Image: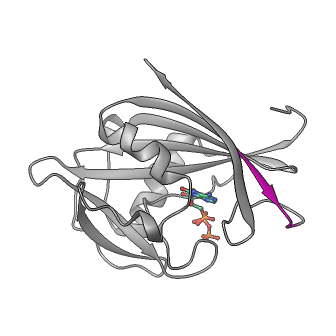
Amino acid sequence: MSNSKRHLPVTLVLLFDRDKDQILLGLKKRGFGKNKWNGFGGKLVPGETVLQAAMREMEEESGVLVEESDMIKCALLKLENQNEVLEIHVFKAYNWRGNPIETEEMAPKWFSTKSIPYEDMWQEIRIWLPQVLAGKAIIFHALFETNTPELMVDDNWAVMTDYELEVVDFI
Ligand SMILES: Nc1ncnc2c1[nH]c(=O)n2[C@H]1C[C@H](O)[C@@H](COP(=O)(O)OP(=O)(O)OP(=O)(O)O)O1
């Protein structure tokens, strides 16, 4: 991987109801990734840590509050194209406060972990999410070819050409 490329950190939070064996996903209503199901997250605002951004984006997009101590880092995704590297810091959580609500950005819905709508999600998630569902912590690095002038690795424009997935003890 080239270190000279711009690195863009973003967050992603996956909420799990262990009793029902369900995961909370949101249907993105606007902008980048519109009409895809995903966890909740986004870009950092200046001065914010990754963890603070994860908590803020979770609450803004779903109405659900996850305490810092309940955020469990479970994956680091490095999605690289010819221009930059999108670094997605993924947290899982089993405890939260509040009920998921529809927001301007996301429409939330609980899914059984056995019927995740992979066909309507980002192309890379079907590779790494099963590892997280199996309780593993992972580092995932994928290369994309894109014809867009800047990131993103939007699969309307980009094709994943290679990837490696490493199971780790701690991220
Ligand atoms: N392949 C890919 N490209 C881009 N983003 C993602 C993926 N896979 C993913 O899982 N994601 C995640 C990473 C983030 O959680 C979101 C994208 O964040 P985005 O909605 O652009 O950030 P916001 O800060 O919320 O931006 P605004 O929509 O408010 O402008 O998808």
- Residue drawn at 42 percent across, 35 percent down: 74
**Is residue 9 or residue 76 the one in the foreground?**
76
Tell me if residue 146 is in the magenta stretch: yes
- Majority SS type along the magenta span: strand
Above or below 163: residue 33:
below
- Residue drawn at 64 percent across, 73 percent down: 32
**Is residue 15 or residue 152 the one in the foreground?**
152
Number of callouts in the render? 0
Residue 155 pos. (x, y %): 66, 66
Tell me if residue 69 is in the magenta stretch: no
- Residue drawn at 33 percent across, 72 percent down: 108
Residue 61 pos. (x, y %): 43, 68
Res 1 → quadrant: top right
Residue 144 pos. (x, y %): 75, 51
Residue 56 pos. (x, y %): 47, 56
170 left or right, relative to 123: left
Q: Which residues are magenta?
A: 142-148
Above or below 78: residue 155:
below
- Residue drawn at 72 percent across, 59 percent down: 159
Ligand 1 rendered quadrant: bottom right
- The answer, for residue 142, to whether it is visible in the render is no
